[in-house]
Amino acid sequence: MKDIYELLNDLNIDENEFEEMEVTDLEKANIKRSLKKAITKKKKRSSWKKSVAAASILVGLSITTFVTYPAYAGNIPVIDDIFRFFDNGKTDKETGLYYDYKKFSNEINMTKESNGIKITIIDAVFDGKTLTLTYSIDSEQDLGNADLSMPRITGMKAYGGTGKTSKIDTNKYVGMLTVSNLENKKLNVANIKWDIDSIRNPDHQTVIKGDWKFAFSLDATDSKIQLTDGSAEKNGVKVKIGKISFNPMSFIVYYDQEVSEMVKNKWDGVDVEFEIKDDLGNIYLGEDNGGIADEGSYQMNGSKTFKRLDPNATKLIITPHITLRDYNSDNFTSVEITKDGEKEIPLPEKPGKGKEQFELKDIIIKVK
């Protein structure tokens, strides 16, 4: 089957029929991003996850995704909304998860410079449980697949998070990260410390030492929590939706995952993804916030963030998609944090190989 670019090549087009339009820098960047994906040959990439065991708690995943767009911009400030820049090319209100984040965020504009590298926190927003911030990096050297530590929030003992960094020009980068409180409590104020003492470059197995220390506070946005008891179960996996938190930018689904002994004995891991739509037909995109579990347990409490709820919606239809998978050196690394540093934990051999996927029945939640 031909793709859209091949179909366009078959058309006879008069260039005088087109009318020029003004577009924003964000739209230019997203068009170039989509075009680059379409014309570049796909390369095989290995996915990886890291689970950290400390005090019998698995700290949520901290994954840094890195994409390079060297032709995009001459300098960082031309991107006025980094939240939307990382919205997977989505620029409209109907599809973009981070469409409203800039509007409800706080301008931080705090810069620290060390060892020829300048890091600036641009914007940040906190909803009582999840911190989302954007940043820029201006460096005198190439940072490759730059890997930064995650911020800490005072009073938060168990957390999960994700991070994304994108190269937009020579030695210039922008990024976005989230840190989510996985404990059963909500904070009215987030006292945030982000102490970065090194930047790892996995591409060259190098570490750049430095001293970038940030400290600031954020008031939580208004939010409402709705308790629920919806659940679904199949093939030895049960998912229960315990509560949903609604805020001006998004809503967060908190869930419990229960796994039978049969599944534990066969598979190394269980992943849960949600397909969510409302009674108006809107489809909601989401991001994983990580999860918490006892060491070695498949029973997990996790959360996922989705775009802002349509104010006219009265029901959410949540379809859990389950993936049972095996772990190997290409897709998983398990480490334990000790007083002497990180210690790799060997992976056990189990009969399940590859992956097995299925979906549970819909969980319908009435929005109050």
Image: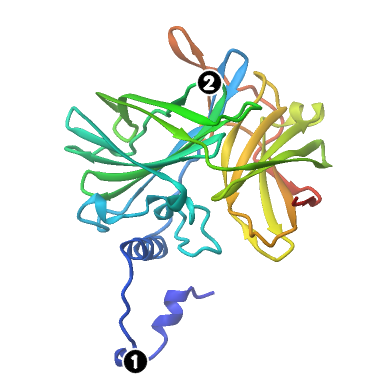
**76 left or right, relative to 278:** left
The residue that label 1 is drawn on is 17
Percent x, y of residue 303: 63, 38
- Counting every numbered tag in the picture gives 2
Tell me the residue at 65%/59% (across/down): 311
Q: Which residue is mark 2?
A: 155
Query: Residue 323's quadrant in the figure?
Result: top right
Identified by mark 2, the residue type is Gly
Residue 316 placed where, x, y %? 73, 54
* Frontmost residue, 128 versus 342: 128
Looking at the image, residue 165 lies above or below residue 147: below
Residue drawn at x 66%, y 24% as measured from the top left: 293
Q: Which of the numbered marks, if any, corresponds to residue 179?
A: none
Secondary structure under tag 1 reads helix
Q: Which residue is pictured at 37% across the width and 31% down the height?
A: 148
Task: Give coordinates of residue 343: x percent, y percent.
Answer: 48, 14
Regarding residue 32, the answer to whether it shows in the image is yes
Instruction: Tell me the colour scheme of the image.
Output: rainbow
Dot 2: element? loop
Q: CA distance from mark 1 to mark 2?
A: 61 Å
Residue closest to the eye, 354 or 120: 120
**Vertical placement of residue 29 versus 113, above or below:** below
Q: Neighbour class for label 2 at 10 Å: few (<14), some, many (≥20)?
A: few
Marked residue nearer the N-terminal end (1 or 2): 1
* Residue 49 can be seen, yes or no: no
Task: Name the foreground residue: 357 vs 241.
Answer: 241
Q: Quadrant of residue 233?
A: top right
